[in-house]
Image (cartoon, grey):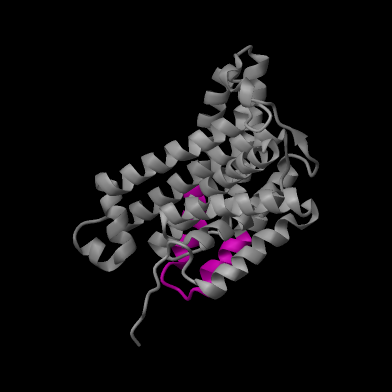
């Protein structure tokens, strides 16, 4: 039974990271119907930013909690700035063009950011400090639930609640929903569509940075390529849950995390990626809109 719970919480932790990144995918797609394939690289940049900040703060003598908080804030701000810049450079000029042009631009930006970090840092894996301190009251459950897993799960839950409140009950959230429904009509009633799209990229990038900090501390190492793998998995999670749906992104991330965890635990770790994409194929065959997605009909 302990082994089952170990796999369960491992999948929950992994799925929570996928969910944090998938939220960025689904928010951008919900607003402008664009798949931001550079989103995984923003996650990777957030992890490297936190690594650099934590190294500086460690030298200055800060304690672990302070380092975690300040490194996360710095990573969120820096990654959000990258998300804002990427949107202005790579996507805004192509807004209104054919769907293929932004897609190619997104892939090109992903490759550019990968190689930029490769040249600026190193092609090798680098050690990431364990920023999350041990939680003493979790010690009886340490065989299947570690402190890092707990923090990842709780952080994702808090982010989901705050994001839901933002979108449903705030002025900017209403503007987001209006822009997602119809950009032209939203502009006619006074919504600054360009501003809303930029804010969406900023929020999504910040969430990806949080995921980068947490997974870096959990795994203990990062490199320039982690964004590509995580980005593909998070995109899969967003499609599983129903791209454009925020609860769907979280649910898709959790389902994907559990699928990988139980598949590798009971079958073979060699097929971790196979389990994920087999699940995606099945969902696309039997429910193309995703678990929580709604099928839409377009009149022609």
Is residue 81 visible in the rendered image? The answer is no
Q: Is residue 83 left or right of residue 143?
A: left
Quarter occupied by the N terminus: top right
Main secondary structure type of the part rendered in magenta: helix
What residue is drawn where x is 57% and y is 64%?
A: 105
**Residue pictured at 69% horizontal, 29% vertical:** 143
Residue at the image point whose x is 32% and y is 54% from the top? 176
The extreme top residue here reads: 61
Does residue 92 show up magenta in the picture? yes
Give x and y (percent) for residue 104. Answer: 59, 68
Q: Position of residue 265 (x, y in %)?
A: 73, 48
Say which quarter of the image contains residue 47: top right
Quadrant of the image containing the C terminus: bottom left
Residue sitting at the far front: 1
Judge whether residue 210 can be spotted in this image: yes
| Apparent side of residue 127 relative to residue 250 in the rendered image (left or right) | right
| Residue 286 vertical position relative to residue 131 in the rendered view, above or below | below
State the count of labels: 0
**Membership of 222 in magenta stretch:** no
Question: Which image quadrant for residue 186?
Answer: bottom left
Question: Which residue sits furthest left?
Answer: 189
Magenta extent: 83-108
Q: Give the percent coordinates (x, y) of residue 90.
A: 52, 59
| Image location of residue 242, percent across then percent down | 46, 62
Question: Which of the two residues, 254 or 176, is positioned nearer the viewer here?
Answer: 254
The relative height of residue 55 versus residue 127 in the rendered view (above or below) is above
């Amino acid at each position: 039974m302990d082994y089952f719970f170990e796999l369960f919480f491992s999948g929950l932790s992994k799925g929570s990271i996928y969910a944090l990144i998938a939220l960025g995918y689904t928010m951008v797609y919900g607003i402008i119907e664009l798949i931001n394939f550079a989103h995984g690289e923003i996650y990777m940049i957030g992890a490297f930013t936190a690594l650099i900040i934590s190294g500086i703060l460690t030298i200055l003598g800060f304690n672990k909690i302070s380092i975690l908080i300040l490194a996360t804030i710095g990573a969120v701000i820096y990654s959000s700035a990258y998300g804002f810049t990427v949107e202005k450079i790579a996507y805004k000029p192509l807004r209104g063009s054919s769907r293929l042009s932004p897609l190619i631009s997104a892939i090109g930006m992903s490759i550019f950011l990968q190689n930029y970090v490769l040249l600026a840092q190193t092609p090798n894996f680098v050690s990431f400090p364990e920023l999350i301190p041990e939680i003493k009251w979790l010690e009886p459950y340490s065989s299947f639930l570690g402190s890092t897993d707990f923090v990842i799960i709780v952080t994702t839950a808090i982010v989901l609640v705050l994001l839901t409140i933002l979108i449903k009950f705030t002025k900017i959230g209403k503007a987001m929903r209006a822009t997602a429904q119809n950009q032209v009509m939203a502009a006619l009633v006074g919504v600054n569509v360009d501003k809303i799209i930029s804010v969406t990229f900023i929020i999504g990038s910040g969430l990806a940075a949080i995921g980068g900090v947490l997974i870096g501390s959990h795994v203990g190492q990062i490199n320039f390529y982690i964004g590509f793998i995580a980005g593909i998995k998070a995109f899969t999670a967003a499609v599983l849950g129903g791209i454009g749906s925020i609860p769907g992104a979280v649910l898709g991330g959790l389902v994907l995390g559990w699928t990988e965890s139980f598949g590798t635990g009971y079958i073979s770790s060699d097929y971790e990626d196979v389990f994920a994409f087999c699940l995606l194929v099945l969902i696309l065959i039997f429910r193309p809109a995703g678990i929580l997605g709604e099928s839409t009909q377009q009149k022609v």
